[in-house]
Image: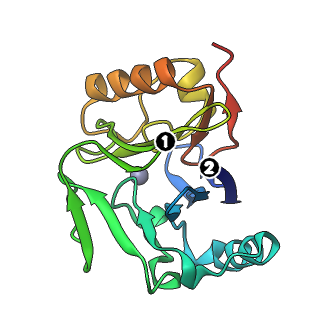
Amino acid sequence: MISLDVLAIGNLERGEDGSIITSNSTSVLIRADDRIIVVDTSTKEMKSAIKTSFKQLMVLPKDVDTVVLTHCHADHTGNIDMFPNAQILMHTGEEIEIPGVKLINHDIELSKGVKLVHTPGHTMGSMSVFIEADIKYVIAGDAIPLKDNFMKMKPPAVNCDSELALESIKAISNYADMVVPGHDFPFMTER
Ligand SMILES: [Zn+2]
């Protein structure tokens, strides 16, 4: 059985000129058959919230064996140090190297029902986690930062290739019953 828990819900606040004022990513815990996985680690500002979530779920961060980074941006990678025993995975094509990270270059099934899928466009190496549990979930990272991007089929404001980004949103939309966006509340796709 696979269980999914949101450790911290991300946010994104922009000023009137569109510049980013606050940006913290969502962080998610997946308990699968043979792995305990964290997807994105958010920022130092979210550390105490994430710690509280672990306590409430009665899971120890040291027992997390896999950390998946949807991409290399700092608002997703700030708490890697909470997980000393985890293998850290990121897709190739990201512009920043992170020490100790294992790069993967193709879609893989990480555990039964948990797949890592390349969803480029926000960055070239962006990847999402596709999960088949009671329903189908996608943890989208910044392939879908906000619900609004999904509802309007609008590529993320920050992107390296808007056409690729739109294809990635469509691929996620075709699969997911529920989307966990990079910086917003999870939502049902109602497909
Ligand atoms: Zn990003």
Q: Is residue 98 among what the camera can see?
A: no
Q: Earlier in the sequence, mark 1 or mark 2?
A: 2
Q: Front-most of 138 and 136? A: 136
Q: Secondary structure at mark 2?
A: loop
Q: Front-most of 61 and 156? A: 61
Residue type beneath disc 2: Ile
Q: CA distance from mark 1 to mark 2?
A: 8 Å
Q: Which mark is residue 15?
A: none
Residue beneath disc 2: 2
Q: Quadrant of residue 23?
A: bottom right
Residue beneath disc 1: 113
Is residue 66 found left or right of 106 in the rendered image?
right
Residue name at image x 26 percent, y 79 percent: 100
Residue name at image x 52 percent, y 67 percent: 41
Is residue 164 found left or right of 54 in the rendered image?
left
Q: Secondary structure at mark 1?
A: loop
What x and y, as percent, mark residue 124? Answer: 23, 44
Q: How is the image coloured?
A: rainbow
What x and y, as percent, mark residue 63? Answer: 56, 80
Residue type beneath disc 1: Gly
Q: Residues within 10 Å of mark 2 (few under 14, many from 20)?
A: some
Q: Is mark 2 within 8 Å of ligand 1?
A: no
Q: Residue furthest right?
A: 56
